[in-house]
Amino acid sequence: MVGRCKTVLGVVAGTVLLVAGPAQALVLFGADLQGAPVAAKLGARPDYGQFWAGAWNERSGWGTVARWTQQLADAGVTPVAQWYYWSGDISPACVSHGCWGHGLWKDRAHWDADAARLADAMHGALHGRRGVVVLESEFNHRGMEAWEPFDGLLAHQAGILRAHAPEVRLVLGFGNWNPRFWPGFDRAAQAVDLVGFQTMRGATRDSAASYAGAVDAIEAAVRQLHANFGKPVLLYDLALSSYWEPQFAAAQNHVLQQLFARLPALERLGLQGVVLRAIDDDPTMTTSEYYGMGERFMGLRHADGTWKPALGTWLAGVKAARAAHPASPSALAWQPRAVGNPWWVEVALPGARGAQMWASVDGGAWHALPATSWGDWAASSHVRPGAHVQFHARLPGGALRDSPGYAWG
């Protein structure tokens, strides 16, 4: 994935079905930016938009980050930045002493400075709306999987991102390998909001049996990450290559069929979101990446627009999941009780008794709202008229949910 800077639409924590009793989680879905209009037209509009950022932005600038962030946020889509500074150059030696990668000098000072630039670009475009950053995607390889100092460095990065963009939620980006070492990144996991993992399959690297067992690997990862860290889990990059069709087009479809069939169990284990790599194949994708020629066939539709079997499965699965659970955050029963009162912040969320609640004003820091004896969450706090107020809840099962923004006064 070295140097990848394609935009991708994905999902993180979506919405909740509000019923009497415990709130139920909902996994939402998405695809790449280029495929978003296709998905929307076919009834599977993305909820969260994801793009890649890395050291290459030192050359290309951070304006693209700001533009993509604003474009997505203005469309009602939460922007998700895949922060990929070290990319395939990562190693203990590179992080410790610096290294050249793709014509750029990389070191910890540049990593920290670029993280601040990334967060500043997003913060300036969000205007108080929510954003998400996946922290150092697929970092745990090339000797990093057991290198304990990186745990503290990731936690430090999380602090930089929060300081520069307090409205951004953070996801720790494990690759789905070497799981015995995952518990060693406890400080980094504590510093983020969700823990994430990547799952990829392709005939150029994986056996037919390994490909067919992708959902077993997904379940094992969700189970372990949630058990290790007690936080919601995001599958932030699901990439299934159909290269060597028709055999592996059928395998791609079979994995998605299994995923949707087992989705309720995965939700119960803590899965909060799935990010699909792409709707369409990309014939221009470099073959120097891990899956070689397979990298060009990660979509659910051929480059000429013809459908693979997996596209129908994906669309049907997304529609069924959304029919089972209301899918729009704005449709939830968030009830701000004190709009117009500049000295009191209160919100009700029916069906979420036992949740933890926070409020943010104008995209600033999140402040806890204690539960009241009458079932709401409230605090005495001054909020200027016209301020943008948003609420954030951690539900009893661990699911994270955001309200729409409200103008106070």
Image (tube, helix red, strand yellow):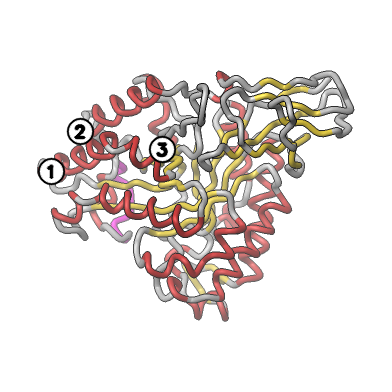
Q: CA distance from mark 3 to mark 1?
A: 22 Å
**Number of residues whose C-alpha sits closer than 10 Å to that of mark 2, classed few (under 14), some (14–19) or many (20 or more):** many
Q: Which residue is mark 1?
A: 245
Based on the picture, tell me whether residue 283 belongs to the magenta stretch. yes
Q: CA distance from mark 2 to mark 1?
A: 10 Å
Mark nearer the N terminus (3 vs 1): 3
Q: Secondary structure at mark 2?
A: loop
* Image quadrant in which you'd find residue 353: top right
The answer to whether 274 appears left or right of 378 in the picture is left
**Number of residues whose C-alpha sits closer than 10 Å to that of mark 1, classed few (under 14), some (14–19) or many (20 or more):** some
Residue occupying the point 33% across, 35% down: 279
Residue 293: image location, x then y, percent: 23, 54
Q: Which residue is mark 2?
A: 308
Determine contact: label 2, label 1, CB under 8 Å.
yes
**Residues in magenta, as a range:** 281-288
Residue 110: image location, x then y, percent: 63, 67
